[in-house]
Image (cartoon, rainbow, N blue to C red):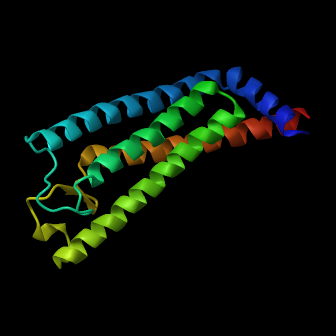
Amino acid sequence: MTVNQLNSKITNALRRSFSGEMKIVLTVAAVLFVVNLVYSAYSLGFAHGGAFVISHDYTISGDNTFMTRLRIATSIGLLVCGAGLAFRNLFGVVASMLGIIWLGFIYGWWYYKSLAFLRNLEVPDFSSLPEISHAAGLWGAIWWDLVALIVAAVLLLWQLAILIRVVRALGETV
């Protein structure tokens, strides 16, 4: 079976047998992207406008653009996730999963930079710095950042489960 034939069979299964479930996954991904985009625009607008949502008293990258790059990178990952799902074919689902894996790298980078931040200040953890927002050891994070990460992980597992079920169903029909 060629890749095109496999893509065609999986696309048909995703658009027919798993159509309802894919619509739910796409809706969750789209809502996650929109809410993240709105939050990012809100927080970055205030952070650069003077009414600081994110404290820039302490910087990680020295040029005060860390949170901007972070918000843009997470929004790109969520956009790729949602756009890939909208195609409802094998390549779209794979692209969607790569978008979520990208988010994993971004959160890993964020955690690494947060540890560097703590080392530079010579403090063991964020409890020594109550004026700095943080969640789960991520500098500048709030509860939404953790929700986005958890929902993205659930989307990845859900997509993997759908693909496994589709491939198994194809194996039974061959």
Which residue is pictured at 23% across the width and 63% down the height?
A: 62
Relative depth, front residue between 74 and 142: 74
In the rendered image, which quarter contains the N terminus? top right
Q: State whether residue 133 is above or below residue 48.
A: below
Looking at the rendered structure, the number of numbered marks drawn on it comes to 0
Relative depth, front residue between 32 and 102: 102
Instruction: Give the side of residue 84 with respect to residue 130, left or right.
Output: right
Q: State whether residue 127 is above or below residue 50.
A: below
Instruction: Give the side of residue 80 with respect to residue 3, left or right.
Output: left
Which residue is pictured at 36% across the width and 67% down the height?
A: 112
Q: Picture coordinates of residue 132 (x, y %)? A: 13, 58
Q: Picture coordinates of residue 8 (x, y %)? A: 80, 28
Residue placed farthest to the front in the image? 63
* Quadrant of res 131: bottom left
Which residue is pictured at 34% across the width and 49% down the height?
A: 69
Which residue is pictured at 15% across the width and 62% down the height?
A: 58
In the rendered image, which quarter contains the C terminus? top right
Q: Picture coordinates of residue 37 (x, y %)? A: 33, 33
Q: State whether residue 14 is above or below residue 128.
A: above
Q: State whether residue 55 is above or below residue 152.
A: below
Q: Picture coordinates of residue 119 (x, y %)? A: 24, 77
